[in-house]
Image: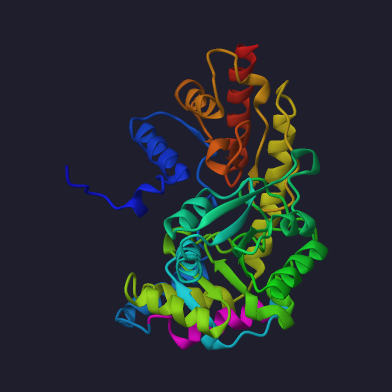
Amino acid sequence: MTKILTDRINRIEVSATMAITAEALKMQAAGIDLANFGAGEPHFATPKHIKDAAIAAIEANFSKYTAVAGVPAVRQAVVDRHAADFGTNYAVDECVFTTGGKLALFNAVQVLVDHGDEVILPVPYWVSFKDIIQYAGGTVVLVESDEREDFRITAAMIEAAVTPRTKAIILNTPSNPSGAVVSPADLEAIVRLAHARGIYLLLDECYAYLTYTGKPVSGGTFTDCKEHVVILGSLSKTYAMTGWRAGFALGPKQIISAMSKLQSQSTSNTTSFVQKASIAALTGSQACVAEMRADYLKLRDQVLAGLKTIPGLTCTVPQGAFYVYPNVSAFIGKGGIKSASDLASKLLTEAHVVVVPGEAFGTAEHIRLSYAVSGDVVDKGVQRMRDFFGQLG
């Protein structure tokens, strides 16, 4: 029989978070009240000045094609914002604006990783990292973190995984799903290690502004090593713009040019008026960012306090992002639950609580909860989980 699908599409799975979101939407459409901790999406509305900029652009008929990499003004806004916040020194031609941060990651991996190249990836990892590497034909080299050390990743752990075939390292700090933050000292050491070895460090800074341990740090700050660093950024979480699909990459001109070339044959430019809205986000008042971060910190403490009331469930304290990653191993094997996936399924169908199972992130004994929700949802969801786990004994 003739093979229909390519090997590369069969190397990847459907995004677990998107699959769970789809199932939750079906249940909500059927009138079921859910406590939804599934998708990593801010509960805030996009700030008004950003929406106003998009409306103004539409009314001014700014709705035609733009340069594939984005209009110069949006790339300048990215460069200037990053320089102001992190002390970097990128030029406009070292920036490409993309249809979401995920596309920036996808394109970066596609232009850097060839068949057989090794890519170092810490565990737990965001669901798409592993699949995007495998789609490119790369070999994933997993670096296991220790829950007893709050899932912290160190330079020594990364260095131990380097081989002559290592082409790239992917680092996500703060981490989705664990909320772990790489320390400034370790981040600098990893950047310098990659530069010295000629390895490309792909830094996912999606949650860079949602750090609770002090001033956020970027790997791009170490400007003498920038030829081996690619910054992958997103406006989605920082400015509550998930559905706008606005992301970017900063890096060496040759890599950015290659990413733009790939983009020219796929999505082309990011939606024109979204670029105008993004300029407003990046150049306008950043008070909204501080306000959202402060609210997430309160929600983090609220959900952690709630989880502590559930006997048998343990959880590290996330230092950034808006996720908790509790260990549910005490409940696996009870009530017919064979895995974290089974547990997540039962929580959804029996307790009407939406979580993502740890298998999606490379661990077998955890579930992820996004606390980017209202305080009422946190209380409702924790109560339902307490009742559910209490019945398991």
In terms of depth relative to the viewer, which is nearer, 356 or 158? 158
The quadrant the N terminus occupies is top left
Q: Position of residue 220 (x, y in %)?
A: 68, 75
- Magenta region includes residue 79: yes
Quarter of the image holding residue 182? bottom right
In terms of depth relative to the viewer, which is nearer, 104 or 30? 104
Q: Outermost residue toward the right? A: 185
- The overriding secondary structure of the stretch rendered in magenta is helix
In terms of depth relative to the viewer, which is nearer, 348 or 159? 159
The quadrant the C terminus occupies is top right
Image position of 1 with respect to 159: above or below: above
Magenta part of the chain: 68-83
Whether residue 207 is visible: yes
Asked if residue 189 lies left or right of residue 263, the reply is right
Whether residue 357 is visible: no
Quarter of the image holding residue 89? bottom right
Q: How is the rendered protein coloured?
A: rainbow
Name which residue lies at 75% across and 64% down: 187
Image position of 244 with respect to 382: above or below: below
Name which residue lies at 55% across and 39% down: 37
Name which residue lies at 48% across and 78% down: 96
Q: How many marks?
A: 0
Q: Outermost residue toward the left? A: 1
Q: Position of residue 243 (x, y in %)?
A: 43, 59
In terms of depth relative to the viewer, which is nearer, 320 or 161? 161
Name which residue lies at 36% across and 30% down: 31
Q: Outermost residue toward the front? A: 164
Q: Position of residue 113 (x, y in %)?
A: 50, 66
- Magenta region includes residue 67: no
